Image: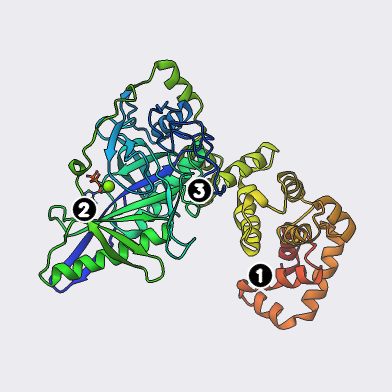
Amino acid sequence: MTESTYRIQGATGEWEVVIGLEVHAQVTSRAKLFSGAATAFGAEPNTQVSLIDAAMPGMLPVPNRECIRQAVRTGMAIDAQINRWSRFDRKNYFYADLPQGYQISQLYHPLVGEGAIEIALDEKDPEGSVKSIGVERIHVEQDAGKLMHDQHPTRSYVDLNRSGVALMEIVSRPDMRSPAEAGAYLRKLRAILRYVGSCDGNMEEGSMRADVNVSVRKVGDELGTRTETKNVNSVRFVMAAIEYEAKRQVSVLEDGGRIVQETRLFNVESGTTRSMRSKEDAHDYRYFPDPDLLPLELDEAFLEECRASLPELPDAKRKRYEGLGISAYAANVLTAEVEAARWFDALLETGAKPVPAANWVTSELFGALNRTGKGIENSPVSVDQAAELLALVADGTLSGSLAKQVFEVMLETGDGAARIVEERGLKQTSDTGAIEAVIAGVLEKNPNQLAQYRGGKEALFGFFVGQTMKAMGGKANPAVVNDLLKKALG
Ligand code: ADP
Ligand code: MG
């Protein structure tokens, strides 16, 4: 394990940052946690609200089996303890976006207990730089509605579409020690959720938000007092909020002040945090078991189904790829996003050779996608088209540099590789007679370099290879060129 070395230098010495994240992840489910209303993003305000979500008197909540199932699967994916007995509690508070006057959550007996998420501190060495971040619990709860203040000069409106949508609250241990570790944790958590299919991880649409708990201490001291910055909605903002908040706390403490435990807000424009309210404790909410709901009891068959439905997860997939000879770095890149991993698995299924396929996808294809700002799910080249191109490299029809040219044409025209090779005569040649003739010409045109080479300057070999390839328009088989040049140069 690589020791994280993020430190803040103060006049009185070095400070260490301690971070714990509470992530709210919207459960992928067509219906809400306790009602049948729809959950689609972007619907007209108040079009997805049942009588339960509007808290009409006498309505009774009924747990949605699919939401519970997704939370259990998520717990299993992080090797967490699954509690076969759990219970819902009411968290009481008043706010205009919460018609019930309480949120149904789980305080005392959460669905999921202790687990862990492994992050890699060095993406070039994902195996050797692993750090395990503890997850304290995952509980299931309702989301609130949304207030709209920009519709009318003097009035506010409330949209209850989100009211009652199922959230998982994933609470980490205070195990992170730098903004980079927090970023790696969030990216890994997001990848796991998306592999599992329990949350779409879309931070822009608010499907995943983080409450960022930060404290500072001198290395080796007890934990310091923390602040909690609420509802930060991108990995970059989380990292910026930590950076700002840690420095702010250090300067307060260095000036002889003390940190107040409080809730803060992150300002996206300025990258700063400001105080919102002093922190409330659990007892302020008068939590008590919800009398409308029976405890959840999970049977073995349900757990078995949850377990059996888990896909291959990022770490397992990465290790499998490495087992195929793919570099640790490429395996890490290929498994970081579920769409890329699925695309690559489909490519392997066509019979493509793993190592050249991985190199091609991570350099050529990802390069092209980056240039055009596209995700792999909108790749201009299909899996079958990629397989065709790679097969032409594998059977020697195309050299690496010809394959690049052909790929460019594929991107422009959408045509298949074989057709492009045929139409444009881009085939690689291994015709020794033709190559020898070109080599003879190259040696004749470069007598100085030839003399230097023969005088012992062997580094010039590459120069002759380059000249020969150039003279042949990049179409000569590089291995044959190498052999024939060695012979010609003696
Ligand atoms: P609450 O539910 O009141 O917010 P918890 O004790 O459940 O409080 O902790 C919430 C989050 O704060 C957890 O993610 C935890 O890791 C983190 N945390 C707790 N103590 C500290 C600390 N001293 N510094 C940074 N983070 C902390
Ligand atoms: Mg909290």
Q: Residues within 10 Å of mark 2 (few under 14, many from 20)?
A: some
Checking the image for residue 462, the label placed there is 1
Q: CA distance from mark 3 to mark 1?
A: 37 Å
Q: Amino acid at mark 2?
A: Lys
In the picture, residue 182 is in which quadrant?
bottom left
Compared with 51, 325 (above or below) is below
Checking the image for residue 336, the label placed there is 3
Q: Residue furthest right?
A: 423
* Pair 3/1: label in front: 3
In the picture, residue 79 is in which quadrant?
top left
Name the residue tied to disc 2.
Answer: 279
Q: CA distance from mark 2 to mark 3?
A: 36 Å
Residue 317 in view (yes/no): no
Q: Which element is circle 3 on?
A: loop
Q: Amino acid at mark 1?
A: Gly
Compared with 311, 185 (above or below) is below
Relative horizontal placement of residue 1, taking residue 312 as reference (left or right) = left
Q: Quick one: label 3 or label 1, which is nearer the N terminus?
A: 3
Residue 33 in view (yes/no): yes
Residue 467 place in picture, x, y as percent: 74, 73
